[in-house]
Amino acid sequence: MNNEEKLQLYSCIKRQFTDPGLYKSSRIYEWMYTNGYSLEKLGYDSFEELCRDFPEVFVFQDIPNSEFVLIKSWQNGDSNISDRGLHPADNFFGTKNIILNDDIIEMTQQSLYALTKILNSSITVQQMKQEVFNSFEEAKQSNKLDFLGEKYVFPIDYCPDGQLVNGIITKNLNAYGKSLYFSFEKTRISRGVIERKQPIAIPAEIPEEEKMHIYSLLIGNFPLNHQLHMAAISKYLTDRGVDRTKFGFYKMKDFLAQLNYLELKEIVLGGVPQILVTIKDLYSEKGAVNSTVNFPLYNRDNNRKASDYIGHNIANKIPVGQLGDFCNLPEKPMAILEKFVEESGRQIDYYDLTDAIAEDFDDARRNGTVRFYGEKLIFPCRFKKNDGSNVELTLKPSTYEGKEWFLYYVDTLVHENKISAVSPVKQLESFAYLGNWQIMLSGLASLAAEEEWDFENSSHKSFQILNQYLKFTFSRILREKKLCISPNNEFAAFNTGLVDKHYDDIYACFVPNDGGGSEWKLVGFCTAFSSVLGKSLTDIFNPLPIAPEYFTRYDDMFFDFNKYLHIDYEHLLLDNICRFPLSFLYEQLFDNQQAREILDRLRSVYEKSERIRLFEQIKKIIASNSRLSLRLQNSLKSSVELAKKRVRHNYKTAVPSYFPKHDSIALMLPLALDDEKTPDVALVLEITRLGSYQAQTILTLSQAYIDARLVSCMSAEWLFASQINSLQTSPEFSTDEDISAIN
């Protein structure tokens, strides 16, 4: 391809794959083909050959495996793209060469679920999505795909009443969504009442032994008396050979409803109907059969034990009696515990050790600190780990003759919280799958009270400020332990610290992300009692999640003129040189030709590593020339004194802020360097242990705004989002994630 052809292809790619990242090769080619860029037209034998001829944009991560390809930003291409204002589907909408996939079309869970109900189908939402894709392809092949009034129309299937359901594809009007949008309509076209093709199913009685076998499977993997997703139960049983159709049941829900030890409950989360299943305990406290379940089970006084039926789990009941009476203590785990105790500086013999853990088990049983994980029983003992937490002992049901339990594992390791261990900016994404960030942020912004969420230079609404706010608010929530998770681990929420137009708190709500990379997934934002989600929130949590707090004393929110202010001007200048305005540095270094030439170059250099290198040169020039250094320091001193005068005139000039990385609170003063009326940077002040102020760093105004917005909605006289240009001279940041202060 020549350069012009590459620019055209790059323009096509960027309309759909707007962000650099790793994508499936097949998805990229399907998008190209849909827009008329077939391999034959471009003159290539394979997609791999095309990618290798276009290294400015495409890079394979794994040479032997070309399934995924990295799309890069191409500076030359970005500067020449002229059709950014067009809709991504403009090039192909109306043609019949579309290939539908998840990258190109928005198909909501609600619409797909509704479609399964209208068609009276028992397939899952994901299977229904594939059915829609298949119907679209069949319509293309059979010339039944119509383009009518700016929408594609194609037949999907007939309802039980004989009415035809058509699929409809239009352009997606959401600027941050996928190119196309799917909906459906029930037509008046009829072929008469039809019988759907479903397996002939005549429900039969499930044998008692089969019920007990299923019970054994379930309690070996799931906790008792906890609400679980039916999908998880269904998949687990199916994977282990439980066939509901063998007993005449077409739907898993009907099959599970026949198992008296299961309790089914229908709920709605995030607008999606779901079924929760609770596995009930078959045994009373004395080990007798629960009277509500009519199974021929046996208690421990009978010839056969309950463990003979249920895989030695003993129904998650805490064993009674002394630890040594029911639990074997193998040599290996006991040796691990003995060694740990000795390395902690305490001498103890084997018999004293066994007595100690037996007493600890009695205490744990009495205090309610025994817990179950699957079939295993875990309890804390008296010995402490390096972080001060208790060593935990795990017991497991024994498969051998003799005692029913044995010591399986001794946990002496310090476990670092996986979410807390990552940087604050990544914690929210580590915790939950959030979907499309732009759509998510747009929804939150529309719910919240009106506020500026973008800086002056934003070419379109990317919600840059809200993005940072949400990430760092969640980090603070974790530090304060205010993340709320339901006892059954089926719902989680936190208070965002934002309010709607009625000043009601806004909450972020999550459900388990079954099969996903993250443990949770976001289902939406809500206020208390509003919508289905808000009602679910209030049903589950009482009290409701609490908003993050940043100040313990209100005095810390205001500048105290009685406190001494320490400023290391040399550190402040040299370590933050890249955050000062180029115009300020150019004026102060007027008599150093070398420095001015470097500053002239910096005005036109945007590559991060090159800017860092040039600023290092400026720093060396200043550090080696005491006259220049003193001149700059004096100018800084004048700006600080002016800032203090502004605070004396208006106390709101000193702005409270929060720094997520170091979990610290500070005040910020505006420094006007070029023009006394217009602040250019912010000076960060923290209170020392002795009660004085220490100047910690200099921030650009965009950094200052984001850190201040975490504490409260902005009302400062000098810090306005609409007047801040976030394209700063600082080479420290090149993405949204880096804008918050890192000092």
Image (spheres, rainbow, N blue to C red):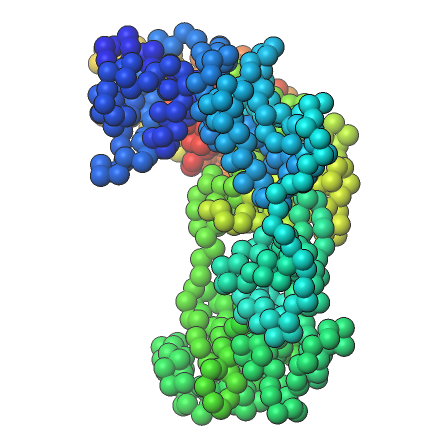
Choose between 551 and 387: the one closer to the eye: 387
Q: Is residue 141 left or right of residue 167?
A: left
Choose between 683 and 15: the one closer to the eye: 15
In the rendered view, would you say 702 is above or below 422? above
Q: At 51% across and 79% down in the image, what residue appears? A: 397
Q: How many marks?
A: 0
Image location of residue 508, percent across then percent down: 63, 40
Q: Is residue 459 at all visible to an observer of this figure?
A: no
Q: At 51% across and 36% down in the image, what residue appears? A: 130
Image location of residue 203, percent across then percent down: 68, 60
Q: Is residue 61 left or right of residue 146?
A: left
Image location of residue 742, percent across then percent down: 43, 36
Image location of residue 457, percent across then percent down: 49, 14
Choose between 13 and 355: the one closer to the eye: 13
The N terminus: image quadrant: top left
Q: At 29% across and 14% down in the image, what residue appears? A: 41
Choose between 117 and 201: the one closer to the eye: 201
Q: At 43% across and 8% down in the image, what residue appears? A: 83
